[in-house]
Amino acid sequence: MNNLERMSALEGLPQQAYGQLDGSKTLRDPLWGTVVTPSANEVKLLRSRTLRRLHEVNHAGPAALHTQHTSTRLQHTLGVFALIAHFAPNWPELRAAALLHDAGHGPFSHALEGIEGFNHYLRAQEVLASEDVQQALEGLNRGEVVDLIQGDLASLLRNREGVLHADHLDSWVRSAAAFGILPFPAPELLRGFRLSGPHLEADADAAALMLRLILHEARYHASAENIGPVAVLRALTQRLIGADGLPPAELGGLTDGELLALLRRHPATAEETGRLLYRPHELHVVRAGEAAPDDAYRYSLNKLYLSLPRIQGGLDAAQLPGYAQLDELNALLGEYLVFWGEVE
């Protein structure tokens, strides 16, 4: 397509295509290129405090502080919703589950999981029982929505079989786009998937690309660039709670900005929070057992997300280029030490 053809295509677009997030217009997903018209239930969900809050929580946690991966949990949620509406447009409970599947996340997404017992799955149960969500689900099978979110009922949203689903598909493609490594537009990749029963199936080319993206995402999670800021943010949050600057029960309901404001204001955390925001390059990360100061922060990397796509035609994923690299990722798990130091 040349420039004149592109300009002509733009002239054919609707005049009101502003990407509203409240359901007042059709939802045009900028990553997947899909158009969805929300139902009355979905409009209520999009206007609920539960979903609005997710636009103030970063999808990739502290990565938003020092990389260009600044997508929010709501943008990811709408990406998953776009995929669900594309493959299963007539399943209202599944569409609602897509909108609510991340409702329990605390500030900076997974980064603060486990602090003072915080568990986003448990918080999700509380959020799903809230009045605004229950009202928005009126007329739907609420129990089915919950089962779909939890993966108790297998679907293209989630499953317990380790098969690539819509949640991870959007996460990995969105991350690749943010890091500038997506080799072609996401709508072209989408054409390589189809729905088979409760699962997505990829053609060989789409499956090979997804494996590359899975490997990239896992290596990023295990990188010093990610582990360092996550470890410091966890330590600062724990210190803030210990200094009575944050009641533990309130942690899960905060947005990223609200938590940062508390950290920057409290004397126990203000100075180091500023250093995290403006001088993250001064962080050092080593494996446990290597030389580190006594006051280094300890961080445990105990999980990587590696669910692989089912491949059309019965092709075994082990035949994909790069499959053997999955075994190498296990060596990245374990204990790390994080500390501040001068830049060499």
Image (cartoon, rainbow, N blue to C red):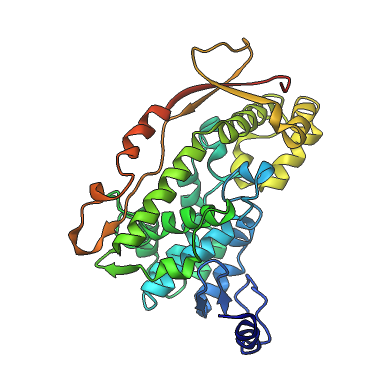
Q: Nearer the viewer, residue 224 or 92?
A: 224
- 21 or 204: nearer the viewer: 204
For residue 194, what is the image quadrant? bottom left
Image quarter of the C terminus: top right
248 or 54, which is in the foreground?
54
Nearest to the observer: residue 209 or residue 82:
209
Q: Position of residue 302 (x, y in %)?
A: 42, 31
Residue 152 seen in the figure: yes
Tell me the residue at 40%/60% (across/down): 166
- Eyeballing the image, is 49 above or below 117? below
Q: Quadrant of the N terminus?
A: bottom right
What percent of the width, then of the height, locates residue 267?
81, 26
- The residue depicted at 70 percent of the width and 19 percent of the height is 341
Q: Which residue: 28% across, 50% down?
A: 320
The structure residue drawn at horizontal position 59% and vertical position 34%, both measured from the top left corner, is: 225
- The reply to whether residue 140 is in sight is no
Tell me where residue 300 appears, x and y as whole percent: 48, 26
Q: Quadrant of residue 259?
A: top right
- How many numbered marks have been drawn onto this rendered protein structure? 0
For this orientation, the residue located farthest to the left is 314
